[in-house]
């Protein structure tokens, strides 16, 4: 069996700002982690990893803005 290389696969680099935007979009208008991951062509595990890393860096907290947006939306 012989394989053919069609192109060079490269890793995408994401900035903290991009990660934060993706992580905080979970829960807005009912968006699930799966839906957000598919939209951005990443895995759910990447999003969970970003959440952990952003929390560690002090850039995101689960009860922060995204959590507030979910709570306010539920009130209507």
Image: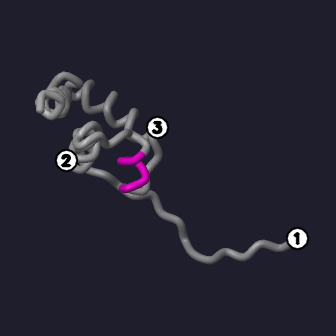
Q: CA distance from mark 3 to mark 1?
A: 33 Å
Provide the major secondary structure of the magenta segment: helix
Residue 55: x and y, percent? 25, 26
In the image, residue 57 above or below residue 19: above
Residue 5: x and y, percent? 67, 74
Give the residue at x 39% y 58%.
12
Q: Which residue ends up furthest to the right in the rendered image? A: 1
Which of the two residues, 23 or 59, is positioned nearer the viewer here?
23
Residue 3: x and y, percent? 77, 72
Q: Image quadrant of residue 41?
A: bottom left
Residue assigned mark 3: 45
Q: Image quadrant of residue 46?
A: top left
* The N terminus: image quadrant: bottom right
Residue assigned mark 2: 17
For the residues bearing labels 1 and 2, Cβ distance under 8 angstroms? no
Q: Secondary structure at mark 2?
A: helix
Q: Secondary structure at mark 3?
A: helix
Q: Name which of mark 1 and mark 2 comes first in the sequence.
A: 1
What is the crowding at mark 2: few (fewer than 14 residues within 10 Å), some, or many (at least 20)?
Answer: few
What is the crowding at mark 1: few (fewer than 14 residues within 10 Å), some, or many (at least 20)?
Answer: few
* The C terminus: image quadrant: top left
Residue assigned mark 1: 1
Residues rendered magenta in the picture: 35-39
Marks 3, 2: nearer the viewer: 3
Q: CA distance from mark 3 to mark 2?
A: 18 Å
Q: Name which of mark 3 and mark 1 comes first in the sequence.
A: 1
Marks 3, 1: nearer the viewer: 3
Give the residue at x 47% y 46%.
43
For the residues bearing labels 3 and 2, Cβ distance under 8 angstroms? no
């Amino acid at each position: 069996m012989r394989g053919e290389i069609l192109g060079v696969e490269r890793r995408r680099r994401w900035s903290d700002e991009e990660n934060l935007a993706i992580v905080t979009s979970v829960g807005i208008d009912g968006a699930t982690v799966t839906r957000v991951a598919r939209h951005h062509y990443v895995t759910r595990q990447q999003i969970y990893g970003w959440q952990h890393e952003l929390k560690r860096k002090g850039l995101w907290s689960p009860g922060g803005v995204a959590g507030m947006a979910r709570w306010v939306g539920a009130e209507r």
